[in-house]
Image (spheres, rainbow, N blue to C red):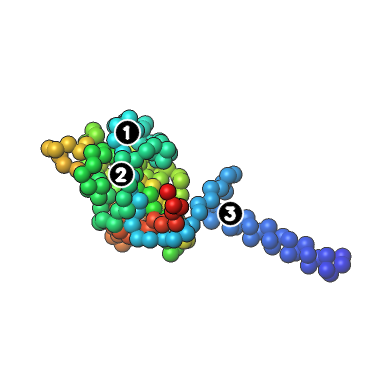
Amino acid sequence: MNPKIMMAAALCVASVSTTAFAEDDFGIESASPIEIADPINPQPGMVLSGYKGSNVSVSDSWLKESVPTLRKAPAIKTVIDKSETFSLKALGSTEANAGMWSGFLKCKRAGIYTIILTGKKTINDGYSVRVNVNSVIGAGKGQTSADAALKVGWNKIEIVCQFSNSPRSGRGSLSIAYKPKESLSDARPLTPAMLFYDQKPEEDW
């Protein structure tokens, strides 16, 4: 066979192999991979939107679909949260009883990470977590944990919390910690202040 043809064939095989490994980083190939756009202008904090009324329910089934539901719903207030816990206190004096945090976590090393969440275990409190659009915890209460695949660079994080918001119990909060799945070290806290949001330029309105 012509040496030039043999060289071209070898390069073609190498290219196909490289592509296959790149798509199989976690041992799973996706038929429809989801592309997450990197932030254009990352700034410290997360976008927190507060909700109340017909947009909010106390059921587990609502929590499981809360992220796509609230993306389409009007918020009663939206702020940049740079606090040390996930709480509706950052919304000020609003009557919101549910909040959605949206932001980005920048990861140095790809891998499977264990996320540990601790909140109140009451009938009107709960949370839902999505990482890179994938549901990690559909409906959680109290303390629970789940594993999430993080890639090198920017990972989109979306968290919904609903709280009883009663005068007697006060506004609840959610604490989050994380660590590599096989690590024996203590989990590190994950707070709105540690994450980033995308501050895109706004058009004149």
Q: Is residue 145 above or below residue 111?
A: above
Mark 3, residues whose alpha carbon is within 10 Å: few (<14), some, or many (≥20)? few
Could you tell me the amino acid type at mark 1?
Answer: Val
Q: Is residue 5 above or below residue 60?
A: below
Give the side of residue 198 with respect to residue 96, left or right: right
Quadrant of residue 55 within the rendered picture: top left
Q: Is residue 87 visible?
A: no
> Residue 29: where, in percent of width, then height?
57, 48
> Distance from label 3 to label 2 (Cα)?
40 Å
Question: Mark 1 sits on what residue?
Answer: 56
> Distance from label 1 to label 2 (Cα)?
14 Å
Element carrying mark 1: loop
Q: Which residue is located at x 27 percent, y 49 percent?
A: 86
> Distance from label 1 to label 3 (Cα)?
38 Å
> Residue 145: where, in percent of width, then height?
33, 47
Give the side of residue 130 with respect to residue 185, left or right: right
Label located before the other in sequence (1 or 2): 1
Name, please, the residue furthest toward the front: 205
Could you tell me the amino acid type at mark 3?
Answer: Glu
Question: Mark 3 sits on what residue?
Answer: 23
Q: Which residue is located at x 50 percent, y 52 percent?
A: 36
Name, please, the residue furthest toward the bottom: 3
Q: Which residue is located at x 78 percent, y 65 percent?
A: 8
Quadrant of residue 31 within the rendered picture: top right
Near-viewer residue (48 or 161):
48
